[in-house]
Amino acid sequence: MRSEAMSKAFTKEVDDLEEEELPEVISLPPGAKNYITPGGYARLKNELDHLLGTERPEVVRTVSWAASNGDRSENGDYIYGKRRLREIDRRIRFLIKRMENAEVVDPEKQDSEQIFFGATVTVSDQTGEEQTVSIVGMDEVDPAHGYVSWVSPIARALLKARVGDAVKLATPSGLRELDVIDVRYQRLKT
């Protein structure tokens, strides 16, 4: 009995350490709203539905089966399954919280010449090199598609600028001046 209690206490302690070792998700600035595009919100909802409807029930079945096999201390299916279940539950809590605090902003409904959330902006630097970025929510960042978070340095430099304006962007290699060439609001690919 004593060794079982010690074993459970040790397992609990090890489980707690494993949870702390997982990387933290970037949180919103204090008091900031969780702006998100309709496509980004739909992607979060689809992931939540998949976790709740498919992945979690499969892992629960595996853990139940593994638990019924007896000794759990050396049962890889049980140990891995419990760990995976904690990861899934943590992600579910995160998605629910993000979606509850989300403020959906549809770029197609924006009508402004100024740069705000949801804008797709083309800029040019001193060398004439052009770059196009879309300002999206923190959960939608995708550098391959040019999607940058509205709290990123480039987005903050561009916010409220208009076509023809020059903005200064602080980079590790020094200050860059960017000229705003085009601002448009369009549906973003998800």
Image: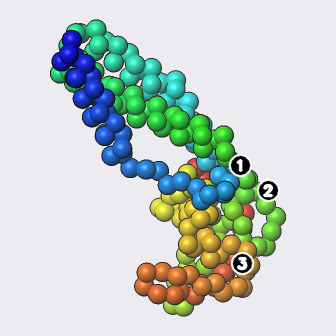
The answer to whether residue 93 is above or below residue 181 is above
Q: Amino acid at mark 3?
A: Ala
Regarding residue 132, the answer to whether it shows in the image is no
Mark 3 lies on residue: 161
CB contact under 8 Å: marks 2 and 3: no
Q: How are the colours assigned in the image? A: rainbow
Between circles 1 and 2, the one closer to the viewer is 1
> How would you rate the neighbour count of disc 1 (Cα within 10 Å): few for under 14, some for 14-19, many for 20 or more?
some
Which quadrant would the N terminus be assigned to in this image?
A: top left
- Disc 2 secondary structure class: helix
List x then y, in percent, for residue 168. 60, 85
Mark 1 lies on residue: 104
Number of callouts in the render? 3
Give the Cα separation between the discs numbered 1 and 2: 11 Å
Q: Earlier in the sequence, mark 2 or mark 3?
A: 2
Residue 116 lies in what quarter of the image?
A: bottom right
Q: Earlier in the sequence, mark 1 or mark 2?
A: 1
Residue at image point 69% right, 76% down:
182
The answer to whether residue 77 is above or below residue 160 is above
The answer to whether residue 148 is above or below residue 12 is below
Residue at image point 73% right, 53% down:
105
Residue 136 lies in what quarter of the image?
A: bottom right
Residue at image point 35% right, 13% down:
64
- Disc 1 secondary structure class: strand
Residue 133 lies in what quarter of the image?
A: bottom right
List x then y, in percent, for residue 99. 63, 41
CB contact under 8 Å: marks 1 and 3: no
Q: Name the side, left or right, on which 140 lies relative to 19.
A: right
Residue at image point 66% right, 81% down:
180
Tell me the number on the disc at residue 109: 2
Tell me the number on the disc at residue 38: none
Q: Name the side, left or right, on which 169 lies relative to 78.
A: right
